[in-house]
Image (spheres, rainbow, N blue to C red):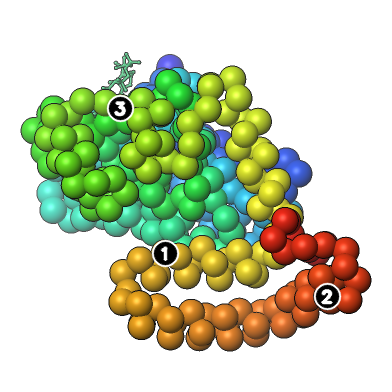
């Protein structure tokens, strides 16, 4: 196949308020080239404020979620050009992962196949993650002579225990979706033929929640991870007060439906938006 145009490196469909965004270089196992990184940033920023999008799902076309960074187009070709090109490529990659981490809308990684190295960046950037049981996760960096950069070491150390992180990074062995779920790299693993249905189910639950509260919640969880208890407590007061600025009526309506109308119970589901 001739080389893919930049705009074809990412595929998007929006269906019933779910944006399905795909790494779209299946012939290269969806490894991340500079073109793909630039296109992902464009796509994500375009979807972020669209009224017909409530949840973003990140998936991969073909047999792979993403085989990490493109060893030829991201590493070798930029190293040949020099430090400026290396830094620019890093900024493009890290830039869209950062946008994804702080996206205004909830995000779900649907890991359908290979997930290597640099792909841990977008994996961690998604708020939730569901894998096929037979998906394969690996920090293969050690196998070709580098350390897990681009956030990958930080992510594995943080999401799994110390021993698991050391083994995973030093041995260069893959784990499957089930093990990734056991370790906390993803929320759960399901049989491959159930993957899309399960992700759709999760997305639909998220679509039923107050979107302002969801945004405030996902940002709060990401922020408090690095705070002391006291700082977190204070931050959360401020965050809730700021959230009231966006949506002062939502929780009053929810309180009314619970206390006055008795039409729902917050402990058992979301109020009627
Ligand atoms: N960078 C560049 N090209 C890649 C990458 C990659 N990360 N992954 C796959 N490709 C290319 C292959 O070179 C091949 O290209 P070609 O058709 O022009 O020869 C094509 O994608 C298909 O790859 P195969 O290896 O033939 O596919 P297969 O299904 O047999 O294996 C697998 C898939 C296991 C993912 C293998 O391609 C692989 O090991 N890829 C590298 C994974 C990796 O270590 N990524 C880097 C992590 S480190 C980091 O991201 C910083």
Question: Is ligand 1 closer than 8 angstroms to the Cβ of mark 2?
Answer: no
Left or right: residue 202 versus residue 71 is right
Say which quarter of the image contains residue 271. Answer: bottom right
Name the outermost residue toward the left. Answer: 145
Determine whether the residue tagged by mark 1 lies in a helix, strand or loop: helix
Name the outermost residue toward the top. Answer: 1
Number of residue marks:
3
Give me the C-alpha separation between circle 3 and circle 1.
25 Å
Determine whether the residue tagged by mark 3 lies in a helix, strand or loop: strand
Rendered residue at 74%/59% (across/down): 270
Q: Position of residue 2 (x, y in %)?
A: 42, 21
Q: Which mark is residue 259?
A: 2
Q: Position of residue 231 (x, y in %)?
A: 36, 82
Name the residue that disc number 3 marks. Answer: 175
Name the residue that disc number 1 marks. Answer: 222
Mark 3 or mark 1: name the one nearer the start of the chain: 3
Rendered residue at 53%/21% (across/down): 192
Say which quarter of the image contains residue 135. Answer: top left
41 or 179, which is in the foreground?
179
Rendered residue at 77%/63% (across/down): 265
């Amino acid at each position: 196949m001739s080389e893919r145009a930049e705009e074809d490196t990412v595929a998007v469909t929006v269906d019933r308020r779910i944006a399905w965004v795909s790494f779209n270089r299946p012939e290269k196992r969806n490894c991340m080239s500079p073109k793909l990184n630039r296109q992902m940033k464009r796509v994500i920023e375009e979807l972020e404020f669209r009224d017909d999008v409530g949840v973003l799902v990140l998936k991969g076309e073909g047999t792979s979620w993403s085989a990490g960074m493109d060893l030829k187009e991201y590493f070798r070709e930029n190293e040949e050009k020099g430090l400026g090109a290396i830094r620019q490529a890093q900024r493009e990659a890290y830039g869209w992962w950062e946008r994804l981490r702080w996206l205004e809308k909830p995000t779900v990684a649907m890991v359908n196949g290979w997930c290597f190295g640099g792909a841990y960046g977008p994996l961690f950037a998604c708020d939730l993650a569901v894998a096929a049981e037979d998906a394969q996760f690996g920090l293969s960096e050690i196998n070709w002579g580098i350390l897990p950069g681009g956030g990958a070491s930080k992510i594995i150390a943080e999401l799994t225990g110390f021993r698991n992180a050391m083994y995973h990074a030093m041995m260069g062995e893959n784990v499957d979706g089930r093990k990734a779920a056991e370790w906390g790299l993803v929320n759960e693993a399901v049989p491959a033929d159930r993957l899309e249905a399960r992700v759709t189910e999760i997305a639909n639950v998220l679509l039923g929640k107050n979107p302002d509260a969801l945004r405030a919640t996902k940002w709060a969880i990401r922020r408090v991870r690095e705070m002391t208890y006291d700082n977190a407590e204070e931050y959360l007061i401020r965050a809730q007060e700021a959230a009231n600025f966006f949506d002062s009526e939502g929780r009053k309506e929810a309180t009314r439906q619970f206390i006055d109308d008795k039409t729902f119970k917050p402990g058992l589901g979301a109020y009627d938006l």
